[in-house]
């Protein structure tokens, strides 16, 4: 009864309420919806955290900085035209080594007669022989080689020395014996004859002589010698002097008699022609006719340098020119006639007679551009020579002269032309310094193509260039990429390892917990920085690839840093696992790894995110410090630490390149501060109790 | 209490055993060729009395580098416990002798910056907590964060630029001036102090931030406690509330942390010392490590491990001693 009453009252009220609602809704014809504004709004936990986070000004600043930094490091390079390892070059005025001049004082031998057999020793002694001649004021000198051949050194015109000799032509041989045969005392005796074979009686005599060791036998009134050449081998020679002609010419008997008469002399005259006798081997003499004395080698201190870019000085040309100079005549090479003239201003000039142009200059001054290229400018050569000569005279080591040179544009490197397309000349001071005793090096300002190092900020390079001529802004971007990447990878490795270890320790407890926590203690104690330094030094020693190094660096940092994450996760899980929801998972029989990683870990997530964010800053600091010390990321990879290190080596650099290292340092600070701000903001947002 | 300390000591010894083992494994896993080439390189330096082969045979004998990890480790441990770490290759004298030469420079550096840090950080931290969410609080927080976030080498370079190059107040590096040996004791001290100012400043700026933040957090916690409300309710002046009631309670965790960092005074400042060429243990070890001086490196790693362990041990014990509410176990 009572119950029914209440029920009916309830029913009544419901109807009233329904009517009211209907009445109300009839005006706007709307039904109540779940998202009606009248409902009490409850934010989801995530949105609550987010709302608290964005209320924190520092966290917002941090987030903004981080977003900018990511855009700068990861998007910036996409729009920036330069790569991190692109080297820039420029034309710049630079005091360079421009030219060099050497006074030739050594007499260099040139071979005139290719066929003449000149003793090497004599050839190499040319310079010292000539110096000796100059010292004793001789103009003629006789030298002999080890074989007794005579050579004559003469001073010719223009200070050129020649080496002359007799050339011998062999006319005949004079022999005391004549080889007949060889005999081998095997298989009953084998004879090998040179010309014609001898009768068997001769052979029998030889065999008898061999067996009785007789060295001479008589046969047919002629004497033969039997000499053992080596074991069981004998050579049989007819002892009879004879003369043999070397060429077609048949010598007269009178000549042969003269040869025989003078066989013990070294030379003799026959028909007023000189002959020499040389002993070739025992009993053999070579008789040669001695020809006229003629130059075979000439030695000079001169060098010939071309005056036309299309003219090459061949060795044939050189020899012909020197030879002509020594006789003060002209000469012809390859059918072209050349003349040699000498004047006060240009020295000795060789000109092509038919084309009537100067082709080469002969001088004992070797002058060239410092890179070895030939100087065609005669005036320049004359000016340089004059200055060097005055330096030689006063024994100065430094000198200078002014010369007008064609100038290049400082930006494009092109030669500057005036309105008539004529190159603009400019007075350049040439500074000469003497080096190594006799080399004169010319230094002057030149527009040179070189690496654009330490360029100040400009429109092309917004932050200038560094010590390798690389764009600083590009390297800042790529450096940021590497720093952020290292930070993220290391923190991810740390967190993964830490969550697994901490989760297992916290969930299982007992001896597993003890072991893992001792492991955590051990890893806490391992000094990270020293170990990274040792590994860095080792990698340096092995000259490891810089990409591989980067991977190693991240792996080692991650492996050494998981302990604090494990400790955090374990502490959280210890308290969480006693809570009701965990008892519920146990009661419903959820698998263990699912219980840990699906139910416990998500509850640790807030703390994990906070520590990971703060950890990121720490990792970036470690990486940049290591790179600063030169033991982390290496060239050509760009990183902030290396960039600072490259310009803070000396006080001068420190003050000069402020625009490089201050911005880079600020980038590091800004990134780390931003991570710390965001980390702090997140911690406060996740855990509001901490703040109040 | 004694039981607790003994238990912690034994645990520390056990951990140290394994830490040293890992250090040994790390070092001995470097290729033999690396040892050989660095030994040969360093043996050519002047002042050496031993040859590279002598060093290498010593390394094999004393460090057991050829005996396999376990046996080799015990060989090394037995000589290390006796304080025998062999001869340094780079400094050509016994490792421990070199260590004794340089450790006091590091200690002086560490102590000065430690004291300076405490003097600056704790009052600022308390101040920030007292005026929470004020401009003072924000600026202190931001400044301390900047201090934490600056790489040491950047701060050192800026200090060098400003104080040594631009203002020329202090020396840019090194430990003594050119005329050091001709000065009397007092001026020698001044000269040395002049060289130490910038490194101390650098170390202080780096470490000030975290202590300041720690102080602020702890003070905030204490200020929210009931007994502070009681003190205020009693009508105590704010100076007494903060100075007596709050500060003393704030000190509990701070003393623990500071006590724990005491052994760190000996560990030297690797980067700061290197950048300012202060020949303390950090500088010496840095050059030993980069040039591959194995004996000194092994010593330094073990030394740092011992110091870290000692730090945690002291912090744990102090925690129990300072705060009677903490139950042992």
Image (spheres, coloured by chain):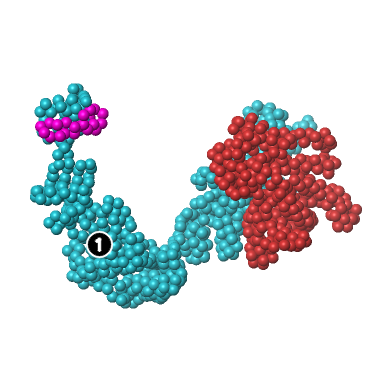
Which of the chains is cyan? A
* Chain ID, mark 1: A
Tell me residue A572's x, y (percent). 70, 38
Q: What residue do we see at 28% from left, 64% from top?
A: A140
Q: Which residues are magenta?
A: A213-233
Tell me residue B79's x, y (percent). 69, 35
Looking at this view, is A215 or A387 the one in front?
A215
Looking at this view, is A619 or A468 the one in front?
A468
Magenta-drawn stretch, dominant element (helix, strand or loop): strand
Q: What residue do we see at 86% from left, 48% from top?
A: B227
Residue B48 visible within the image: yes
Q: Is A510 left or right of B234, judged from the image as shown?
A: left
Q: What residue do we see at 56% from left, 45% from top?
A: B41
Q: Is B325 left or right of B214, judged from the image as shown?
A: right
Tell me residue A461's x, y (percent). 49, 62
Residue B1 placement: quadrant = top right
Q: Secondary structure at mark 1?
A: helix
- With respect to residue A348, does B179 lie above or below? above
- With respect to residue A427, does A462 lie above or below? above
Q: Give the drawing colour for chain B.
A: red
Q: What residue do we see at 31% from left, 76% from top?
A: A345
Write down the residue under mark 1. Answer: A319
Tell me residue B224's x, y (percent). 81, 50
Determine crowd level at label 1: few under 14, some 14-19, many 20+ residues with C-alpha closer than 10 A. Answer: many
> The C terminus of chain B is located in which quarter?
top right
- Residue A218: say if magenta: yes
- With respect to residue A101, does A680 lie above or below? above
Q: Residue furthest right?
A: B234
Q: Residue furthest top?
A: A188
Residue A663 visible within the image: no
């Amino acid at each position: 009864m009572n119950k029914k009453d209440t029920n009916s009252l309830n029913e009544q009220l419901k109807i009233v309420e329904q009517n009211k609602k209907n009445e109300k809704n009839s005006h706007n014809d709307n039904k109540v919806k779940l998202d009606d504004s009248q409902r009490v709004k409850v934010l989801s936990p995530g949105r609550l955290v987010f709302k608290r986070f964005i209320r924190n000004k520092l966290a917002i600043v941090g987030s903004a900085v981080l977003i900018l930094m990511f855009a700068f490091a990861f998007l910036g390079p996409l729009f920036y035209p330069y790569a991190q390892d692109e080297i820039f070059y420029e034309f710049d005025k630079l005091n360079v080594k421009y030219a060099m001049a050497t006074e030739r004082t050594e007499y260099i031998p040139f071979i005139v007669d290719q066929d003449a057999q000149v003793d090497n020793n004599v050839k190499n002694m040319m310079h010292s022989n000539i110096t000796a001649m100059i010292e004793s004021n001789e103009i003629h000198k006789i030298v002999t080689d080890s074989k007794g051949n005579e050579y004559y050194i003469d001073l010719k015109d223009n200070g050129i020395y020649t080496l002359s000799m007799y050339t011998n032509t062999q006319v005949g041989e004079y022999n005391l014996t004549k080889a007949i045969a060889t005999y081998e005392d095997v298989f009953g005796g084998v004879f090998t004859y040179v010309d014609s074979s001898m009768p068997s009686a001769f052979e029998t005599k030889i065999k008898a002589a061999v067996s009785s060791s007789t060295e001479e036998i008589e046969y047919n009134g002629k004497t033969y010698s039997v000499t053992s050449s080596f074991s069981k081998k004998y050579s049989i020679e007819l002892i009879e002097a004879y003369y043999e002609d070397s060429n077609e010419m048949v010598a007269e008997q009178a000549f042969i008699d003269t040869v025989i008469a003078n066989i013990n002399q070294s030379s003799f005259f026959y028909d007023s022609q000189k002959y020499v006798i040389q002993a070739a081997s025992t009993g053999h003499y070579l008789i040669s006719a001695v020809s006229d004395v003629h130059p075979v080698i000439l030695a000079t201190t001169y060098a010939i340098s071309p005056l036309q870019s299309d003219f090459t000085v061949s060795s044939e040309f050189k020899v012909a020119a020197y030879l002509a100079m020594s006789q003060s005549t002209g000469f012809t090479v390859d059918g072209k006639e050349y003349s040699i003239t000498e004047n006060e201003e240009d020295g000795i000039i060789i000109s092509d007679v038919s084309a009537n142009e100067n082709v080469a200059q002969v001088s004992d001054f070797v002058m060239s551009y410092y890179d070895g290229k030939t100087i065609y400018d005669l005036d320049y050569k004359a000016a340089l020579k004059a200055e060097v000569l005055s330096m030689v005279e006063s024994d100065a080591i430094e000198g200078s002269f002014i010369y007008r040179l064609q100038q290049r544009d400082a930006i494009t490197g092109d030669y500057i032309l005036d309105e008539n397309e004529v190159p603009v000349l400019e007075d350049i001071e040439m500074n000469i310094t003497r080096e190594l005793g006799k080399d004169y090096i010319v230094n002057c300002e030149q527009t040179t193509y070189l690496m654009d190092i330490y360029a100040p900020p400009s429109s092309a390079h917004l932050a200038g260039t560094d010590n390798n001529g690389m764009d600083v802004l590009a390297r800042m971007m790529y450096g940021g990429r590497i720093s952020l990447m290292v930070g993220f990878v290391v923190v991810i490795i740390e967190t993964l390892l830490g969550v697994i270890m901490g989760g297992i320790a916290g969930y299982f407890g007992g001896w597993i917990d003890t072991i893992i926590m001792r492991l955590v203690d051990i890893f806490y104690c391992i000094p990270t920085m020293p170990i990274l330094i040792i590994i860095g030094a080792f990698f340096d020693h092995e000259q490891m690839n810089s990409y591989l190094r980067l991977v190693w660096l991240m792996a080692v940092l991650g492996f050494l840093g998981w302990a604090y994450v494990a400790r955090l996760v374990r502490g959280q899980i210890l308290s969480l696992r006693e809570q009701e929801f965990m008892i519920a998972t146990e009661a419903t029989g959820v698998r263990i790894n699912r219980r840990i990683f699906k139910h416990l870990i998500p509850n640790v997530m807030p703390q994990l995110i906070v520590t990971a964010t703060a950890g990121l800053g720490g990792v970036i600091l470690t990486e940049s410090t290591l790179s600063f010390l030169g033991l982390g990321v290496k060239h050509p990879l760009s990183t902030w630490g290396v960039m600072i290190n490259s310009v803070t080596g000396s006080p001068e650099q420190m003050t000069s390149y402020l625009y490089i290292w201050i911005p880079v340092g600020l980038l590091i600070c800004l990134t780390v501060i931003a991570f710390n701000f965001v980390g702090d903001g997140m911690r406060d947002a996740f855990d509001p109790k901490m703040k109040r | 209490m004694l039981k607790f300390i003994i238990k912690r000591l034994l645990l520390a010894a056990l951990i140290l055993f394994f830490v040293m083992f890992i250090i040994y494994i790390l070092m001995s896993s470097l290729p033999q060729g690396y040892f050989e080439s660095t030994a040969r390189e360093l043996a050519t330096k002047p002042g050496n009395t031993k040859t590279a082969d002598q060093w290498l045979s010593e390394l094999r004998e004393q460090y057991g580098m050829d005996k396999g990890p376990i046996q080799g480790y015990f060989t090394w441990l037995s000589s290390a416990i006796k304080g025998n770490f062999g001869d340094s290759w780079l400094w050509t004298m016994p490792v421990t002798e070199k260590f004794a030469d340089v450790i006091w420079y590091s200690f002086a550096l560490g102590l000065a910056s430690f004291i300076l840090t405490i003097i600056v950080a704790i009052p600022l931290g308390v101040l920030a907590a007292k005026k929470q969410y004020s401009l003072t609080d924000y600026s202190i927080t931001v400044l301390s964060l900047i201090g934490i976030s600056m790489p040491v080498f950047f701060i050192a370079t800026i200090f060098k630029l400003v104080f040594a190059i631009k203002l020329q107040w202090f020396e840019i590096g090194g430990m003594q001036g050119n005329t050091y040996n001709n000065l009397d004791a007092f001026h020698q001290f001044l000269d040395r102090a002049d060289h130490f100012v910038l490194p101390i400043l650098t170390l202080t700026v780096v470490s000030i931030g975290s202590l300041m933040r720690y102080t602020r957090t702890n003070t905030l916690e204490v200020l929210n406690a009931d007994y502070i409300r009681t003190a205020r309710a009693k009508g105590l002046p704010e100076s007494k509330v903060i100075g007596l009631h709050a500060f003393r309670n704030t000190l509990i965790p701070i003393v623990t942390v500071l006590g724990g960092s005491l052994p760190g005074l000996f560990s030297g400042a690797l980067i700061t010392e290197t950048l300012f060429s202060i020949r303390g243990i950090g500088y010496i070890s840095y050059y030993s490590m980069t040039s591959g001086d194995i004996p000194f490196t092994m010593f330094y790693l073990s030394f740092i491990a011992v110091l870290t362990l000692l730090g945690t041990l002291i912090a744990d014990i102090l925690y129990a001693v300072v705060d009677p509410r903490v139950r042992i176990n």
